[in-house]
Image (cartoon, rainbow, N blue to C red):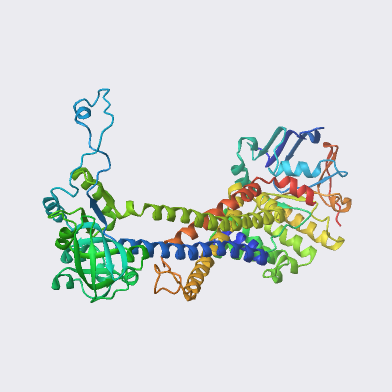
Amino acid sequence: MSPLLEARGVTRTLPGPPPVTLVRDVDLAFTRGELVAVTGPSGSGKSSLLYLLGLLDRPSSGRVLVEGRDAAALDRDELAALRLARFGFVFQFHFLLPEFTTLENVLIPMRRLKVRPAQEMAERARALLDGLGLGEAAAKYPEQLSGGMRQRAAIARALANGPAVVLADEPTGNLDTRNAATVFDIFERLALAEGRTVIVVTHDRDLAARTRRRIELVDGRVVADRAAEPVSA
Amino acid sequence: MPAPLFLEIAMGHLRRRRRQTIVSVLGVALGVGFFVAINAMMRGFQQYFVAQIIDVAPHIVVRDEFRLPDLQPALRAFPQGAVEVAGVKPRAEPRGIRGARPMMEELRTLPGVAVAPVLQGQAILAYGTREVSVSLMGIEPERERLVTNIEQDLVEGRLADLRTSANAVIVGAGVAERLGALPGDTVSALSPAGVQLSMKIVGMVETGITAIDSSQAFTLLKTSQVIQERSNVINQVRMRLAEVEQAEPLARRIEERFGYRTESWEETNRNVLSLFVIQNAVMYTVTGAILLVAVFGIYNIISTVVYEKTRDIAILKSLGFRERDVQAVFLAQGLLVGLMGALAGAVVGWGLTELLAQVRIDMGGPVLRGRQGFILAREVWPYLVGGAFAVVAAALAATIPARRAARLNPVDIVRGAA
């Protein structure tokens, strides 16, 4: 069985002058239900690698495969469709649309996908919010929420279409320790209980220590890819 | 059924920038409104003017003239030859339309066509020591009333009075004034042929057009033929049609058939009508400029929204929105502003038109005598054309920023915001 998500010899270079290589010759494979931390110093290419794995960016050379399918063969619309159905993104900034309530924000990806009837979409969005302790916040606008709640709302939105892969880019960067721990609890549940693959870019060593697999990047290269027993927080 | 997602996002963006949105909508509304109002004013005046032209004068006049001099026999015999005839003197032949009777019989058979014969000639009317040169129209009252408005323009007397007294004449109001004569007075008429007649004024006409009122007089065709010494001659055939638009093509057919110079009302008034074309061009340019400014306003607001919403665009794209989905969000904003502007513009246009209708101006001139304000054409099409133009222009204005939004690379933005 091919892995869920795979990078083969992926290199990403920004055209110059002078050309900057963000990611160098990375080979990685991820299977279902993995919780993975990607660490490394600033500018080591962590985020760039995440965007490549999430099909937001295309590699300069090498290939990204989703369930064995080469993403390079897909056009932009097909990539968008794949992201919509199979990927969920969480960024450092919550990126909730300020014109919509929390519930409506969670509904947006479902409404774009258009596979569930309206009633079911609303029920599912409520269930997602309830599951993340945001039942009270459903009718509120993002600006009325605290930072931790916003980030959880953003996670709920990432989960809207039941993605196989959740990609998080410094999701706890703007949060205090307690909220950061809550977010990580959620990621653990997504991976271990729900069988999603969760890849988290972080430079918080304490949080990274809670994952079973840790990948370390330096200058765009993978310098360590360790499987270890997670240290409970 | 809820609104489509892209429309909901678009409306959310516009609601957020309420004041700017209102200003943009007002800009479009003013453009559309002014277009409607100015159009009503201009077209109202033009339609009134054309109606006046059409009512006052016959629709077609056949004259005893030719557009081109008759070909010389030598030229006719050798149409391809290098023939030149120099020093040709026009033949002195008695003027008048030859074969006028059969011609009129033939024209009368056309459906919706009224025909009247006229002998027009010069005469000098004298009353006491005053003399006025007039164009004396010899008419057949029963026929003339079918081709011109002379009967409605009579301010004193009746057309039939021409027949009840001998050598009766109806003069223009200006002619009467210059002569100092009143209906009932007898004036002396002298023609270029040297015939002098005593004529009794039995009526007065006032068309409102000074040039006509101060130079025309009407008498019976027979009387005119006597005073001009041209028995049984007519030099004009005047026609009125049920369908005014047919005047020009029919005039061309008549000229081709009979050879005489035949003028339709359009040809006679070509200078005025071409003035209207220029007037309209000015109007459309001005209202177009207003709309253009409004369109720049739309471009501005949507560009601003795109700039401010780059993060939202990035997240939408990372969530799996296609380029065309993002583009639709911003195109919809342009369309919404255009639509709201078109609707508000219809209200503004209607309001301005009714406001103009309230304006009272004392028009001293004789042409618009009796009118004390703007003549307004209340038509539906300017609302539709103005509205459609606004919506299309707004959509075009939104296209550029919408495409820019669609092309944004989410990675650049997410990286920058992190």
Quarter-of-image position of residue A68: top right
Horizontal and vertical percent position of residue B164: 14, 73
Horizontal and vertical percent position of residue B185: 24, 75
Res A179 seen here:
yes
Q: Nearer the viewer, residue A158 or B325?
A: B325
Is residue B181 toward the left or the right of residue B341 in the image?
A: left
> Which residue occupies 60% across, 50% down?
B327
Is residue A188 toward the left or the right of residue B187 in the image?
A: right
Horizontal and vertical percent position of residue A40: 86, 43
Res A158 seen here:
no
Quarter-of-image position of residue B294: bottom right
Q: Exactly how many numbered labels are in the figure?
A: 0
Q: Nearer the viewer, residue B12 or A93?
A: B12
> Where A140 falls versus B71 (above or below)?
below
- Residue located farthest toward the front when viewing the structure as drawn: B129
Horizontal and vertical percent position of residue B11: 60, 63
Q: Nearer the viewer, residue A7 or B107?
A: B107
Quarter-of-image position of residue A97: bottom right
> Where B325 falls versus A133 (above or below)?
above
Is residue B261 toward the left or the right of residue B300 in the image?
A: left
